[in-house]
Image (cartoon, rainbow, N blue to C red):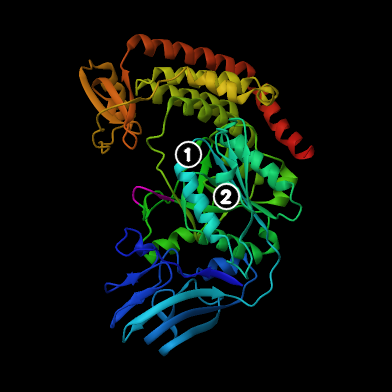
Amino acid sequence: MILQNIIWPNTTGSEITELYYHTNNNIIISENNIYLPANTTICFDTYFNSFLAKKWAEYTKIEIVTFEIEVSGKGVVQLIADKDILIEQKEFDGKKKVSFSISIQKYSFYYLKLYSDDSTIIFRGIIKTDMIGRDIRLALVICTYNREKELFKNIEILKEKNKNQVDQKSVLEWIYIIDNARNLKKNLIEEEKIQLFPNPNTGGTGGFTRGMKEAMKENSMTHIILMDDDVQIEFEAFLRTKSFLTYIKKNYEEHFLGGAMFRKDIPYILHAAGENWLDGHIENPYKNTDMRTINEVVKVSENIIENQAYAGWWYCCIPRNYVEKKGYPLPFFIHVDDVEYSLRNGKRPIYLNGIAVWHDEFEDKKSSIIEYYDVRNRLITNSIYKKENRKLNAIYIICERLYANVFRYRYKDFKLSIKAVEDFLKGPEWLFKLDTEMYHKKLMEYGYKMKNVNTISTSCQYPKRNILYILLRYFLPARKKARIRIGAPIIAFAGKKKVLLIDPKNRKGFLVEKSWIETIRCIVEALKIIKKVSLDFSKAEKAWRKQVIKDEKNF
């Protein structure tokens, strides 16, 4: 079975070529081959093409693998381990398949390196095994809402690449498109393995849950992949998911297999490859890592040590038997749903190089409605999984959101924070009876409305200041006006009276203004809700924990 292909982008000169190969010369690449002039070196010590033997040895039953590269020309192919340890080299002259078989137990990672004496063409490179593994049958679920352009790009890739990939079989057996906007046409999407399901707007959580339920109807399905509609992806990610799971050891069969996320705007920069949930705060140890060097690839390949790591639903593979044991996600609508579902698993997600997507950065996506879901769903998740001081944590979250919103002049958003706390205290019975689509529309009326703006924001580089400094500046008179990114830190607001907050990608934004009246109102509301939490929190948290146990038993 092919464990992974050696892959490359379709054009030279791209920002991301060093995620695939390093070379000392001008080469010509196409979808089907790479052309090397004479006296050229190409090295596959990269994120997509190195073989992380240590990880395969730890998590799978694989012991022997074969590197094979099909070339035409004249030169030398080397198999190299770790940092420039030459394992073996072979010369070629003419059209040949050059192969190396090795045990993966000795070194951490391997890669191929090729020198061309004359002009040479690389047709294909693979890493394979003769070992027989278990049968893996993958279902892909994509939840979409009015993102036709991005969705159709991914559907075209799926239609083109999902045929004859592994042993003349499809990599993905079922592909479910869940349309929360209910405006896509079946004749433009569906074919033998792709099905479209119109769905009420129950958010990403509801859409993915609907897809999971459809997938579970297929008795032979073994794993469900959840993927965002607006990502860019290498189809190779699906193949590596399947090959890795084919040989995974028994004690890791219920672990999630997560996908890394690269930034679309700077495509060689990694945003996440496993994140930690620290009682409501996300710790991202790999954020803004440049992945063009093998040192960073190996560093990131090490799993996060803490056991509260989660796999984001931009790409997450979930075993069928986990769903059967633990049930479906809680109806969170959006945000923190992937955190809760991973924590419910209780097992650290696994990450493998080459299983990744490119996604828009989140820093300027903080619309008002997100405030509600972030606060409510953080409270629910912490009430279930935080081991101690849960009530104090809830009070801390209220105070944190008071500080974050008041000092950004986003007073309407703090109203949504209060609403989120009130709804958390109602318990799961209220949420499970709720018409989430209608309630979402109602919540949208609370916050700031995004409008087109004919300007762009200023730089997002700001000096670091402590909380005391920010407090002092807030109590001083403010007269300045500014336009800044929505994701700007609080210090960007210091000394400003009016601020135009902008999402620079789509040039939409809204105006906020410092107000002492609104500040006092927010403080009073915070004190009221803290009192309510002090009285009612224990009852609510017990109800949320019982709900998860109930879901598991009643699946």
Name the residue that disc number 2 marks.
316
**Placement of 358 over or under 539, stated as above or below:** below
Magenta span: chief secondary structure: loop
In depth, the one of 109 and 198 nearer the eye is 198
Helix, strand, or loop for circle 1? Answer: loop
**Residue farthest along the left direction in this orientation:** 480
Residue shown at the point (52%, 59%) measured from the top left? 160
Question: Is residue 537 visible in this depiction of the protein?
Answer: yes
Quadrant showing the C terminus: top right
> In the visual, does 381 lie left or right of 446?
right
Quadrant showing the N terminus: bottom right
Q: Earlier in the sequence, mark 1 or mark 2?
A: 1
**Placement of 45 over or under 187, stated as above or below:** below
Helix, strand, or loop for circle 2? Answer: strand
Mark nearer the viewer, 1 or 2: 1
Q: Amino acid at mark 2?
A: Cys
**Marker disc for residue 504:** none
Q: Amino acid at mark 1?
A: Arg
Q: Which residues are magenta?
A: 262-266
| Image-quadrant location for residue 377 | top right
Residue shown at the point (55%, 45%) measured from the top left? 188
| Image-quadrant location for residue 497 | top left
Name the residue that disc number 1 marks.
147
| Position of residue 514 measured from the top left corner of the image (x, y, whole percent) | 30, 16
Residue shown at the point (45%, 58%) measured from the top left? 300
- Give the class, few, some or many, for how many residues have Cα within 10 Å of label 1's Cα (few <14, many ≥20): few
In depth, the one of 110 and 524 nearer the eye is 110
In depth, the one of 215 and 184 nearer the eye is 184
Q: Is residue 265 magenta?
A: yes
| Position of residue 503 measured from the top left corner of the image (x, y, whole percent) | 34, 33
